[in-house]
Structures are given as structure tokens and as C-alpha cells.
Image (cartoon, rainbow, N blue to C red):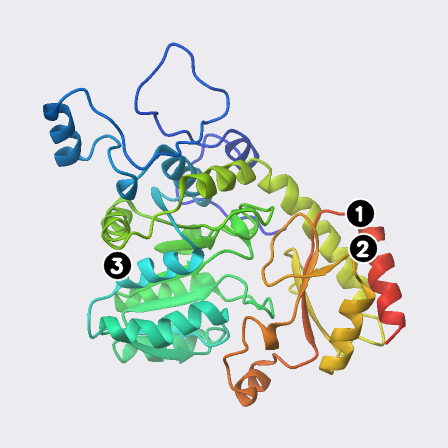
Amino acid sequence: MRKSTPPFPMRKSLATLSARGVRAEPPARDVGRPTSEPLYQTAVFDFPDIASAESAISKGDTYFYARHGRPNEASFAASVAALEGAEAGIATSSGSAAVLCAALIGTSPGDRILCQRDAYGGSRALLEHDLVNFGRQLELVDAYEPAKVADGLSRGARFVFVETLSNPLVREVDLPALAWHCRSYGALLCVDNTLATPVSQRPIAHGAELVLHSATKFLGGHHDCLAGVLVGSQALIKEARALVTRLGLNAPAFDSWLSARGLRTLPLRMERAEQNARTLADRLREHPAVKRLHYPGWSAMLSIDLGTREAAEALARACPQIHVTPSLGGVESSFSHPASSSHRNLAVEERTALGIGPGLLRLSVGIEDAEDLWSELGRGLAQL
């Protein structure tokens, strides 16, 4: 498992930070304090008089209106920032909202963005089709060749967006090299760390300035919340917080509460899921029905190419306990068919060029018993 050194000394291990989390101060301190943070399911906060309300609104030093923040969002974002080795964080309504926020604070109208060509379809579509309405330009680039990213930077690009591990082919970028080129040209490097999680990779330690997650995936871990999170320096997150407030991109209290609860077991879940993924990868690599295995040697994600859509559909039918789910990162394993879901909007020719064919199945590996998982997968593959 990959280990990264945080940019400054940490007094607690990742496991301790995850288990304890970071708690935002409640609006008022009682004599006792709940062991688990309460759910602040409120849109507004009351004040004893006009002067107190005016002070809170003008200074922004306490909670007053949910669009400006609530304790649950603050606690979740601070916990992720601690895990990533960042100074600060902001919770958003989804991972896509975090991508939008990062791109808007990291660029100005007229700027050009470099985006990893095989990035998650939703992120790429947002940058490719919607950011143009904000006056930005997009250039798709092969992020696995830092020289090509450097070429784009030399032509004036100001913002580079990549994934630690690509979705769905789990390819790994060279973060230190990309960060070096970004620093050389004064550009900002933003990394989607959703698939790796801070358990396996910390992009800020390698020079990234912004890191984001779809908390709906591994951070939350139970397929019961929809949220995103963006972390970075105090200065950048201050800009992000103002943007989130203006656009109403903040995460709901309940989804933040669920995400923060999921963080408590993140290292334990990821350790088990990665062990399972390695076990399955070793066996899938040798199976005659598998045309190609995509697996970096670590991570809880892998993809298998079975050649045809018919074979992919047959395996999914033969493994009814491994559900077809248009997401990933839950405690239970799940299949996804990228060609018909996350990357369906790409032309067939482009999907083919990227290696996302009709027979590709992405497997998000959960924390079940590895032998139970292989029993079902092996039985299904034997029917192909």
C-alpha cells in the first residue's frame, strides 16, 4: 500500500485521525457534550437580539444561515483536510460541485484548463461543456505523459485537473512530475483523489494545491449519502467557501453527518477492500475468460475486459450478489458498465481509443470475505 509523507509533521496517525475525526464547535457550549456530533438539521440559527445577529452576519464568526455553513459540514470538511494533510476544507453538495468550485476559484475568464483525457465522464463533461459558459477553455491531454502536460502549460494553461487513479481503468498519474511542471509555469494542480483516498495517496504531499473527493464513494462508504469535499490552503478554501455560499453548493447537514461517520472506519474498510482486490486480481489475471485486467497493484478498484457486451451482461447476471451499481466505494462489492453509464456520452470511437470497450466491467471491491467473492465471480466466469 502506498504511503505518502504529509507536507508538515502530524501528531496523530491516519487511523487515529479517522477514528476521532474533527469536531466543529457547536453554536453554544453546554456543560456536557454529546459523544457523537448531533445532526444540525436547521436552516437558520436564532439570536437573542438584533445586535448579536448583526455581529454574526457581518463578522461571519458563528453560524447564522445554512448556506453559509453548519457544524456538520464544517466537521466533515475539517476531518478530510486533516487526513489529506491540508490546511482547510469545504464540503459541497456533490463531487461534481467540488470540481466546479475548484475550476472556478483556480481560473479566471479566458483561462485554459488541461483535463486528463480519460477522466471520469461526469467531471470531463462538466469541464468540457459547462465551464465554457464561465469563459474558460478546455484542452484534453494525456496526463500519463508529463511532457504533454508541460506542452499545454507552455501554451498558457493555468489549471490542470487529473485523477490519482483514473475511472474506470485505474491508471496512475505521476503526481510529483505533474506538480513540478505546474510550479514551473505558475499553474494550479487539482487532483481528484476519490478512488485512492488519503489512506493510499496524499496528493498535497506531492505538490497538488487542491484535492477533491466525491464523498459519495469511499469516504462515506455506505451508498447512503451524496456529498463532495474540496481541501487545500486556507487562502484557496476561503475563496471556495465564498463561492459555495454564493452559488448554494454547500453539502446538506445529513449527508455531511453520514460522510463524517463513514470516515471513522475509512482505514479499516480500505485495508480490507484492497486486500480483497489484490486477491481477486491475482486470480482474474490468469482466467481465460478475462481478455485484460486493469489493476495498478493497489487500490480497491479493478476493471476486467471480457471482450463483448454480451459477456459483460452474462457475468453480471451470473453474479446476482454483486449488484450493478452506477457508483462505487461501498462496503459491498458492485459492478459498473462504463460504456453504458459513466462514459456513455463519449463517441464509440473515443471510448475505444481510451480502452473503454463494450466488454469492460468495473468492479468496486468491498469488505466481504474474499473467498465468497471469488466463489461467485469464478462460478460466473466459468459460464462464459
Q: Work out how far the residue at label 1 is from the one at label 2, CA to CA, in angstroms.
A: 6 Å
Residue at 55% over, 40% down: 262
Few, some or many residues within 10 Å of mark 3 (<14, 14–19, 20+): some
Residue 341 position within the rendered picture, expressed as x and y whole percent measured from the top left = 57, 72
Location of mark 1 (residue): 369
Say left or right for 272 vs 28.
right
Quadrant for the C terminus in the image? bottom right
Few, some or many residues within 10 Å of mark 1 (<14, 14–19, 20+): few
Q: Quadrant of residue 111?
A: bottom left
Any mark on residue 373, and which? 2
In the depicted view, which residue is nearer to us: 263 or 69?
69
The amino acid on which the numbered mark 3 sits, given as a three-letter code, is Ile
Say left or right for 240 vs 11.
left
Secondary structure at numbered mark 2: helix
The amino acid on which the numbered mark 2 sits, given as a three-letter code, is Leu
In the depicted view, which residue is nearer to us: 12 or 170?
170
Residue at 15% over, 33% down: 59
Residue at 36% over, 37% down: 74
